Image (spheres, helix red, strand yellow):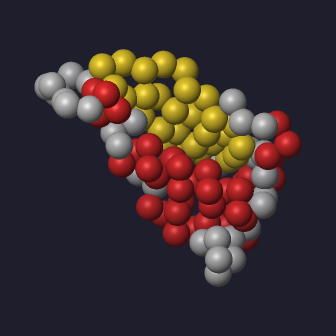
Amino acid sequence: MSHIESGVFVFLPMSYPKLNGYKKSFSSERTMKVLFIISTDEGETIYNAMRFANVAVKKGDEVSVFMLGKGVLFEKSGNEEFNVLQEVNQFEGDFYV
C-alpha cells in the first residue's frame, strides 16, 4: 500500500497463473488483481497512478480504479504537463467515480 498522504492507495490482493499456455518469463506467467483508490486532486499524482494502472492493464492484469473524495475532481486536475484525461481515456479496466 502506498503512503497515506499521497492520496493513492494500491492494493494487490491476489495473483494467479494465466491459463492461456506456457510463458517464458515469470512476469508474464502471472496476472494480478490490482485496485487503485485515488483520493487526491493533485494532477501529477493522479497522472502517475493512471499511468501505472494503464501499464498493468497492458500487461494483462485485472485493474480497477476508484476515484473517491477529491479524486472525483480528476477532470479538472490535469494540465499540459500531466494530462490526466488522456491517461483516464486510455484506461481499459474498471473505472468508478
| Residue 80 appears left or right of 53 | right
Tell me: residue 38, above or below residue 72.
Answer: above
Could you say where residue 68 lies in the image, as x and y percent from the top left?
74, 44
Q: Nearer the viewer, residue 25 or 37?
A: 25
| Residue 30 appears left or right of 82 | left
Could you say where residue 44 lies in the image, as x and y percent from the top left?
71, 63
Find the residue positioned furthest to the bottom.
Answer: 80
Q: Nearer the viewer, residue 89 or 58?
A: 58
Q: In which quadrant of the rendered view does residue 12 lie? A: top right
Q: In which quadrant of the rendered view does residue 30 lie? A: top left
| Residue 51 appears left or right of 73 | left
Could you say where residue 88 lies in the image, as x and y percent from the top left?
54, 60
Find the residue positioned furthest to the right.
Answer: 5
Q: Residue at x 71, y 56 (%)?
A: 45
Total marks shown come to 0
Tell me: residue 81, above or below residue 50.
Answer: below
Could you say where residue 69 lies in the image, as x and y percent from the top left?
80, 47
Find the residue positioned furthest to the left.
Answer: 21
Tell me: residue 62, above or below residue 59.
Answer: above
Q: Residue at x 53, y 56 (%)?
A: 51
The quarter of the rendered structure image containing the N terminus is top right
Q: Residue at x 85, y 42 (%)?
A: 5
Tell me: residue 62, above or below residue 79.
Answer: above
Find the residue positioned furthest to the front.
Answer: 25
Q: Residue at x 72, y 43 (%)?
A: 8
